[in-house]
Amino acid sequence: LYNILPLQGIQHSYGLYLTASILVSCVQINLILAIFNLFPIPPLDGSRVLMNFLPPDLQSKLARLEPYGFVIILVLAYLGLFQFLFMWILTPLMHLLL
């Protein structure tokens, strides 16, 4: 994106740089939210996708985790597991898209 916005023959200005920075930040935030939402923890959408591929007995076990999903998310965030997963997934996506 940084290479697209500053067109040849146009002087680089602070406004153009600021616009590119804001657009990059918006893409990063959207990628983070999309990746977070796809984690297979019951209150998130990733668990709904996973349930479609699981046999019925495992679907019921995953559904029983739903009341504890928020606590699971907090524990994973406290342990820093989300940071590891985000960097492992997000870095290649950012290089691919930007």
Image (tube, helix red, strand yellow):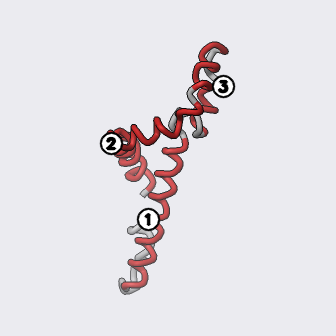
Type of amino acid under label 2: Gly
Q: Are marks 3 and 1 in contact (CB under 8 Å)?
A: no
- Mark 2 burial class by Cα count in 10 Å: few <14, some 14-19, many 20+: few
Q: Are marks 2 and 1 in contact (CB under 8 Å)?
A: no
Type of amino acid under label 1: Ser
In front: 75, or 44?
75
Camera-side mark, 2 or 3: 2
Q: Secondary structure at mark 1?
A: helix
Q: Secondary structure at mark 3?
A: loop
In front: 78, or 84?
78
Q: Quadrant of residue 60?
A: top right
**Quarter in which the N terminus is drawn:** bottom left
Q: Earlier in the sequence, mark 3 or mark 1?
A: 1
In front: 26, or 13?
26
Say which residue label 3 marks.
52
Task: Locate residue 2, reporting x and y percent.
Answer: 39, 68
Q: Which mark is residue 80?
A: 2
Residue at the spot 46% in from the left edge and 35% down from the top edge: 72
Say which residue label 1 marks.
25
Could you tell whether 47 is left or right of 10 in the image? right
3D distance between C-alphas at marks 2 and 3: 29 Å
Q: Up-down: is 96 above or below 41?
A: below
Q: Secondary structure at mark 2?
A: loop
Type of amino acid under label 3: Asn
3D distance between C-alphas at marks 2 and 1: 22 Å
- Mark 1 burial class by Cα count in 10 Å: few <14, some 14-19, many 20+: few
In front: 3, or 59?
59
Residue at the spot 41% in from the left edge and 78% down from the top edge: 18
Q: Up-down: is 11 above or below 31?
A: below
**Quarter in which the C terminus is drawn:** bottom left
